[in-house]
Structures are given as structure tokens and as C-alpha cells.
Image: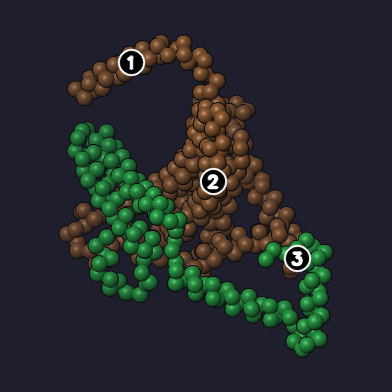
Amino acid sequence: MVAPPRPGGGRGVRLRVRSMSESGPPDPLKRLGEQIDKVRLQARKGERKGGDVTSGGALGFGLRVSIEMVSALIVGVGLGWLADHFLGSRPWGIIAGFLLGSAAGFANVFRAVQGMGRPPPRGGHGHGSSDGG
Amino acid sequence: MYFGRYKAWAGRRRAAVTATDQATADSAAAETDLAEVSAPLEQFVVKPLIPLHLGSYNISYTNSALLMTIIVALIMLLLVGATSRRALVPSRLQSLAELSYEFVIGMVRQEIGDEGIAFFPLVFSIFMFVLFANFIGLIPFSFSVTGQIVVTATLAIFVIVLCTIVGFVRHGVHFFHFFLPPGAPLYMAPVIIPIEVISYLSRPVSLSIRLFANMMAGHTMMAVFAGFTLTLGIFGFFPIAINVAMFGLEVIVCALQAYVFAILTVLYLRDAIHMH
């Protein structure tokens, strides 16, 4: 995997190059590049298939969801409190902020669960259910 | 009225605290050594190393700032040093630098596409900074910069302000459609718009709290178990074993949280560049 220290590594590669040039293909680097491209393409396909952003087990997922919920509540209640502070509408701003914040928290959680922050592939907004979020 | 009740409660609480203080003052004297050793939150205290004042602002050079300087210097050293030779068959150091580069650029390209390459330097800087800050925080007697919510919040606010600017530059007034999803009926707008605005504003909060909470929780837990080691005497090997296992977990968490911070930055940028 990891290249051995410099002198050894260099010798190994040179040896392989010589044996390849004997057997035919003139440019081993080109072949190496092709192989790398192939592997990279496969890796990219694999990533697409099992694309699980921010994976980290169930615990990590639970933590993420709860943080999404709580942060929306913090922002909602904070904005409500600020509105109260400047408009002098003591309880109502916080109440409205709490309700809107929890709604936003549910929206966040819904989005996080839906695709771990990844929407379905673009191309038409025809997904009726995803609009309501 | 509420305030009066709070005052009464606070007064009672203060009285209770002072009473217990006096009661335990004698026994506490014997335990101060242990208490000092096992104070699990002491590791997060920001101490000024070079006191500086600008007007009424305290801009002292703190241990946090020192650690950040070290982090940036290490990143520079690694990247410049590793890529200076540019060997075709990379050395270990060079392949480390190349791996991190490939990792981040793959992430950007996959999520945003080729328009996102302009933001690659930003994402790479954020990723490397958070990664190094997390890992250096694991070294005993160092300081976890990402365990300070000021640091993570500053990063997160920077990211979100940038995303908003990018969104307005690319889409102009159309960016306001971000807060009213297409297909939503117009009479729902008074409800949906505040919810979406709160949801948008909660992004920096969740981004900063996630990193900060993970770091702080892990470090606090390790400090608590290390404190048990001293108090348990001969059974102290047990918390040490737990701490060894937890250190392994923390290494994973450090790498994972740096990745999460970077990928969420990328996702928010993608939302700003390709709306909905």
C-alpha cells in the first residue's frame, strides 16, 4: 500500500519498468494511468450507490437529528425573544417563536432523514411529497 | 412578578450554596488536590498568554490562539513540505497530502459539480483546519480549539454568510424562492416563509453545535474517567482501559467530525449554487 522508503521504492519501480519494456508495451505509465482511471470510475460508482453522507452509526445519526431539532428551536425562540425585546410584546413573540421553531425543527429532521441532506436527483420538481417539507 | 419569584429563588439558592460551602469547607481542604486534578472542564479554559488590549477590547494572545497558530503552521509545513519534491511515486508524506487533496476535491466535484471547484480552496482549508484542530486537541496537555464554541460558531457563520452571498450573486432576487419551495400554495406563504427562514438560520447553529458538542463531550468524558483513575486507587486500571478504548473512538470522531463539517459546507454551498 504505502510506498517503501525512497531508495527501495525507486528500485522496485525501475525493475518493473524494465520487465514490462521487455514484454512489449512501450509506455507502462499510460497503462498505470488507465488502470487508475478504471479504479477511480468504479469507486465513484460505488460512492453513488451507497452514498451515505455523515454516516457514523445509529448514535451519530441520532445525535445529528437531535441537534437539527434543537438548533431550530434555539433560533426560533431566540428570534421570538428578540422580537419581544424590541416590540414589547412580552409573551407572544416567544410563543410564536417556539411554535415556528419547532415546526422548523421538524422540517430539518424530515430533510435530514429523507436523504441525509441529499435531495433526490434533480430533473423536475414532480416529487409531490418532498414539497411539503 | 416572574422576576420577583426568580429573585427569591436565587436568594434561597445562594443561601443554600453558602451553607453547604461552610459545611464542607473543612473536609474540602483535604480533597482539593483530587478536585483540582479531576476538574473535567478545566481543560477548556482559555488563558491569556500575552495580555493585549485594544481600547476596551481584550485581544490577548491566548492558548487557543497559540494552538491555532501551531495548527496553521503544521498544515502549511505538511502541504508545502510534502509537495515540494513532487515525485511520481509519492513518498508517505506526499501521498498523505495527495490523499487529502483528492478526498476533498472528490467531495466538491461529486456534490456541486464543476462550478464548485472555485470553492475548493475554502472547503479544503476548513477541512484541514478542523481535522488538525481535532487531532491536536487529542494530544495530552494540549488544547482543543474546536471545543470552543466561539471558534466553531465563527467558522459556521462565515460559511453561512458566504453561502448567502453566493446565492444572491448567482440568483439575485430569485434567491428568495429558497424560502418558498416551488409548488407550495401561496396562501401558505405566511407560515412557510418564517419556518424556512428559521430553518435556514438554524444551519450555522447546528453546524457549530455539532462540532463543539462532539469535541467537548469526548474530552470531558475522558477527563472524568481519568479522574476516576486517581480516586479508585488499586482499581484504577479499569478506567484506564476504558480511556484507551475511548481514545480510539475519539480518533474516529475527530476525523468524522472534520468530514461532516466539510461535507455540510459543501452541501450548503450546493444549495446556494443550484437552488432546489
Is disc 1 placed on a helix, strand or loop? helix
Q: Nearer the viewer, mark 3 or mark 2?
A: 2
- What residue would you read off at disc 1? B16
Q: Amino acid at mark 3?
A: Ala
Q: Position of residue A57 (x, y in %)?
A: 43, 56
State which quarter of the image contains the C terminus of chain B: bottom left
Mark 3 touches mark 1? (CB < 8 Å)? no
Binning the other alpha carbons within 10 Å of mark 2 as few (below 14), some (14 to 19) or many (20 upward) gives: few
- Does residue B46 appear left or right of residue A20 in this picture? left
Q: How far from the left and from the top, in percent, is residue B193?
A: 26, 54
Q: Label 3 lies in what chain?
A: B
Earlier sequence position, callout 3 versus callout 2: 3
Q: Tell whether B42 sits left or right of B6.
A: right
Under mark 1, the amino acid is Ala
Nearer the N terminus, badge 1 or badge 2?
1
Q: Quadrant of the N terminus of chain B?
A: top left
The residue labelled by disc 3 is: B87
Judging by colour alone, the chain drawn in brown in this rendered image is: B
For mark 2, what is the residue? B245
Single out the mark in the foreground, 3 or 1. Answer: 1
**Marks 1 and 2, Cα distance to the nearest angstrom?**
40 Å
Viewer-nearest residue: A1 or B136? A1
> The residue under label 2 is which amino acid type?
Ala
Give the answer, above or below, for where B150 lies relative to B271.
above
Q: CA distance from mark 3 to mark 2?
A: 38 Å
Residue sitting at x 75%, y 63%: A4
Element type at marker 3?
Answer: loop
Query: Looking at the image, which residue is at 81% across and 74% down?
Result: A14
Can the viewer see residue A125? yes
Q: Which chain is green?
A: A
Cα gap from disc 3 to disc 1, whole angstroms: 69 Å
Residue A90 placement (x, y as % from top left): 20, 33
